[in-house]
Image (spheres, rainbow, N blue to C red):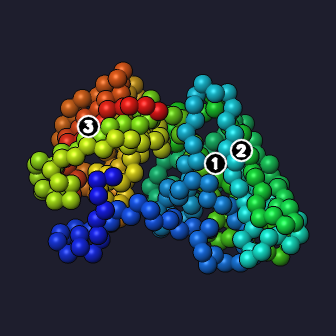
Amino acid sequence: MKKYINYLFALAIVPFTFSSCLKDEDLIGPDAPGATSNIIEFKNIAPISSGTTAPFALYVPTTLDPEVSETTVNAIVRYSGVNDAPEDIVVNIEYAPAVITTYNTAQTTTYQAIAPASFTFPTTVTIKKGEREALVPIVLKTPELDPSISNAIALKITSVSTNDAISGNFGTVIYSFPVKSIWEGTYTYTITNNFGTIDGNIGGTFTETGVKLSTVGPNELYMQYLWRTYNGYAHYRFNGDDTQLTGITAFSGSNLAVTINEVILVDPVNKIFEVRWTGLGRGVIERFVRTGD
């Protein structure tokens, strides 16, 4: 990452709302200090991908390799009491596809519920006495999933065998399982800000190695930190045959206005792409050269 930006200082010098780049700040979730005691909930198994106003937490635990016949992802239910579970706690879980519809309506997204025949999971698990967690293995039949849609599973804790409460925030969760993009990997990233508003925090141009692009949707890649300078992220979307960059999302505190000025290069063989675009008035050229997985 280019540098740390002090949020208050940044706000003082520019009339825009960029979040600071707090690379080491922990995600606030069910594992946060001060979490309510005696709650049964789903544990974070990946960073939360949904915003703070979303009705349910959404995760992207992994990307799926279409050449692998089955993929197992372990969801986890946990007992968040101050001590370990004082007795065996039986937790009942159901598949809740209607939750995905509710999420899509609230967030203007297009996740699609995976057909029940394409995955399995245990509908009952037990948090053993003296322990805090139980695994919920989700087994996905990867070749049966459509790589062109946003595949998702919603799980809901319906009841527990004790008097412990079910979490209001993490009693129901959504897991998205994108099929791996050919662009997923590690890159040498170069950014140049030489038109539009010149951003002093970018510093004209810089290069960073080891930058990850990870699949988050159909032909859609995620890069942590906007321009590797500000808190947030960028998404890059490609067409179905990966020969054209079709869209960019820039998020730092909120979604920012984006204009693609020119797609300079898309080379799916050597995994190189370069694009000239404008975000919140700042004109940048970004170049990605893949160096490994």
Identify the residue under disc 1.
153
Residue type at tag 2: Ile
Residue type at tag 1: Ile
Horizontal arrangement in the rendering, residue 150 relative to residue 113 (left or right): left
Mark 3 or mark 1, earlier in chain = 1
- Local secondary structure at mark 2: strand
Mark 2 or mark 1, earlier in chain = 2
Mark 2 or mark 3, earlier in chain = 2
- Local secondary structure at mark 3: strand
> Where is residue 9, by image quadrant?
bottom left
- The residue positioned 60% from the left and 75% from the top of the image is 33
Residue 169 seen in the figure: yes
Q: Tell me the tag on residue 287.
A: 3
Residue in front for this viewpoint, 246 or 281: 281
Q: Tell me the tag on residue 235.
A: none
Horizontal arrangement in the rendering, residue 46 relative to residue 281 (left or right): right
Horizontal arrangement in the rendering, residue 104 relative to residue 223 (left or right): right
